[in-house]
Amino acid sequence: MSARDWQLKKDGKQWMVGKTFDTFAPVGPVLVTRDEIPNPHALPIRLRLNGQTMQNSTTAQMIFSVEDLLAYISQVVTLEPGDLIFTGTPPGVGNARKPPVFMKDGDVAEVEIEGLGVLRNPVRQEG
C-alpha cells in the first residue's frame, strides 16, 4: 500500500512516509517457513483490484535474491525468526499506468502468491 498524496507531498523523493500508515502492511493469509517453499525465486505473484489483474509477475523478477537480501540486511539489523522484510512490488503499480489507477473506498485488493493463498483486503478511506 502507498498513500501517493503523502508520499509525493514534499519533493517526491521520500517513499517511507507514504508506506507506513497503520494497516498499510497487510500479510497473510499464512506465513510459511523456508522448508515449505521449494524455490523462493519461482513464485508467481499477482495483484487484482476489483477482480482485474493489475500486477502479474514472479519472484524470479526480484532485483536481489532472498539470500543477498538477508546477507545485506543482517549487517545492520539483528534478524529474528518471524521478522518480515518488505521488498517492493512488481511492475503494474496504479500511479504508473496511463491513465493512473488509484484505489478508492469500496475497492477490493487481492494479492495471490501461487501455492500460498490469497490475501483479500477491502479498501476503506478513513475520515
Image (cartoon, grey):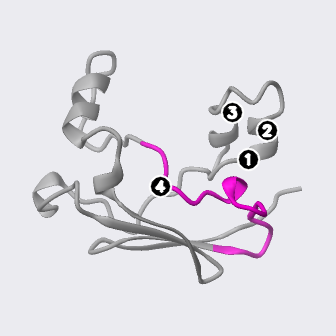
Residue at mark 4: 90
Residue lying at the far front in this picture: please name it: 98
Magenta stretch: dominant secondary structure = loop
- In which quarter of the view is residue 109 placed? bottom right
Instruction: Give the x, y percent position of residue 94.
Output: 68, 59
Residue 49, by quadrant, is bottom right
- Residue 44 sits above or below residue 79 on the image: below
Magenta stretch bounds? 87-108
Alpha carbon of mark 2 to alpha carbon of mark 1: how far? 6 Å
- 87 relative to 38, above or below: above
Under tag 1, what secondary structure? loop
Q: Name the residue that disc number 1 marks.
A: 3
Say what amino acid the circle numbered 3 marks: Val
- Labelled pair 2, 3 in contact (Cβ < 8 Å): yes
Task: Point out residue 73 in the picture as x, y percentages from the top left corner.
Answer: 31, 25
Task: State the separation of the CA atoms marked 2 and 3.
Answer: 7 Å
Q: CA distance from mark 3 to mark 1?
A: 8 Å
Circle 3: is it few (<14), some (14-19), or many (20+) Cα within 10 Å? some
Q: Are marks 2 and 1 in contact (CB under 8 Å)?
A: yes
Give SS at disc 4: loop
